[in-house]
Image (cartoon, grey):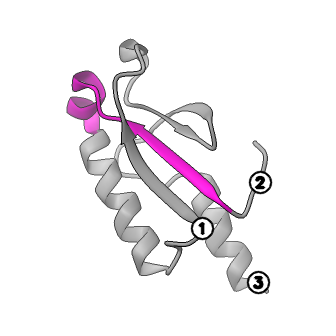
Amino acid sequence: MKRDKHIDIELCMGSACFARGNRFTASVIDDFVKKHGLEKEVHVHGSMCENRCRTGPNGRINGESCSCSVGEVPQPILELVRDRRTK
């Protein structure tokens, strides 16, 4: 996955993905972003159904499809925090 300074996280909020945990994942990511002061680098938002309900919960990171782990912060955001600490 291409590493940019800006990370766009789009979480499917269709009924299947919402019920399978994206409602929790959104708040976990949002809280993490705020805690680490990443509001300028990370944009988290919801989307309508992506029609991939069988593989949900689904999302996109910088436009690339991904399967969301319920309640976990995506790797690119963790790497951004790690990179900040090593500078």
Mark 3 Cα shell of 10 Å, populated few (<14), some (14-19), many (≥20): few
Image point 56% across, 51% down: which residue? 8
Magenta highlight range: 6-21
Q: Which residue is mark 3?
A: 86
Along the line of sight, the residue nearer the viewer: 77 or 45 = 45
In reply to whether residue 33 is colored magenta, the answer given is no
Q: Quadrant of residue 5?
A: bottom right
In this rendering, position of residue 33 left or right of residue 86: left
At label 2, the amino acid type is: Arg
Question: At which x and y percent is residue 80?
Answer: 66, 68
Disc 2/disc 1 C-alpha distance (Å): 12 Å
Q: Which residue is mark 1?
A: 41
Q: Earlier in the sequence, mark 3 or mark 1?
A: 1
At numbered mark 2, what does the secondary structure look like: helix, strand or loop? Answer: loop
- Quadrant showing the N terminus: top right
Which amino acid type is shown beneath numbered disc 1?
Answer: Glu
Q: Label 3 sits on what residue type?
A: Thr
Residue 7 on the magenta span: yes
In the drawing, does residue 38 fall left or right of residue 26?
A: right
Q: Residue at x 28, y 26 (%)?
A: 14
Residue 16 against residue 12 in the figure, above or below: above
Q: Residue at x 45, y 70 (%)?
A: 33
Say which residue label 2 marks: 3
Percent of width and height locating residue 74:
53, 52
Q: Residues within 10 Å of mark 1 (few under 14, many from 20)?
A: some
The residue nearer to you, when weighing 52 against 86, is 52
Looking at the rendered image, the quarter that the C terminus falls into is: bottom right
* Mark 2 closeness class: few <14, some 14–19, many ≥20 residues within 10 Å: few
